[in-house]
């Protein structure tokens, strides 16, 4: 009877050993998958950060360009306004001269 028990224990031991090997293989495969997923996640995080930095820099550049364009538009508008005011003043001065000349001419005519 002890031989039978010993044989049975040997079979149970081999069965447990086989189950452990299967579990080891499953865990090894899962570990490989986790490492791969971790590597992919790290790559995606790097891509995200790179794109985020690019977008932030592009946004800053666009805002600076817009500010510069606005400044230039304002400068051009102010220049046109100043020119218009100058032209109006010159026209008024011209009209005054003309009226003065007309008055002088009428005076001389009479």
Image (cartoon, grey):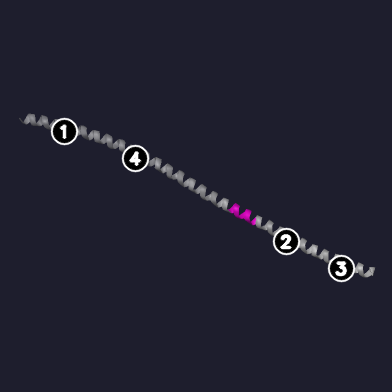
Horizontally, is 22 left or right of 76 in the view? Answer: left
Residue 46 coordinates in the image, percent (x, y): 45, 44
Cα distance in 3D space between marks 2 and 4: 71 Å
Mark positioned earlier in the residue sequence (1 or 4):
1
Label 2 sits on residue: 82
| Residues under numbered marks 2 and 1 in contact, where contact means CB atoms less than 8 Å apart | no
- The stretch drawn in magenta includes residue 46: no
Label 4 sits on residue: 34
> For the residue carrying disc 2, how many other residues have a C-alpha within 10 Å: few (<14), some (14-19), or many (20+)?
few
- The circle on residue 22 is none
Label 3 sits on residue: 100
| Residues under numbered marks 2 and 3 in contact, where contact means CB atoms less than 8 Å apart | no
Residue 68 coordinates in the image, percent (x, y): 62, 54
Cα distance in 3D space between marks 2 and 1: 101 Å
Task: Tell me the SS state at disc 1.
Answer: helix
What range is drawn magenta here? 64-71
Label 1 sits on residue: 13
Mark positioned earlier in the residue sequence (3 or 4):
4
Cα distance in 3D space between marks 1 and 3: 128 Å
User: To which quarter of the image does residue 39 belong?
Assistant: top left
Cα distance in 3D space between marks 3 and 4: 97 Å
């Amino acid at each position: 009877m002890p031989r039978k028990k010993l044989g049975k224990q040997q079979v149970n031991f081999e069965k447990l050993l086989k189950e452990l090997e299967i579990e080891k293989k499953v865990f090894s495969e899962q570990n490989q998958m986790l490492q791969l997923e971790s590597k992919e996640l790290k790559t995606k995080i790097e891509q995200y950060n790179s794109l985020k930095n690019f977008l932030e820099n592009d946004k800053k550049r666009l805002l600076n360009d817009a500010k510069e364009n606005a400044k230039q538009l304002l400068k051009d508008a102010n220049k046109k306004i100043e020119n218009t005011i100058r032209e109006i003043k010159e026209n008024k001065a011209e009209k005054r001269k003309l009226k003065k000349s007309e008055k002088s001419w009428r005076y001389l005519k009479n």
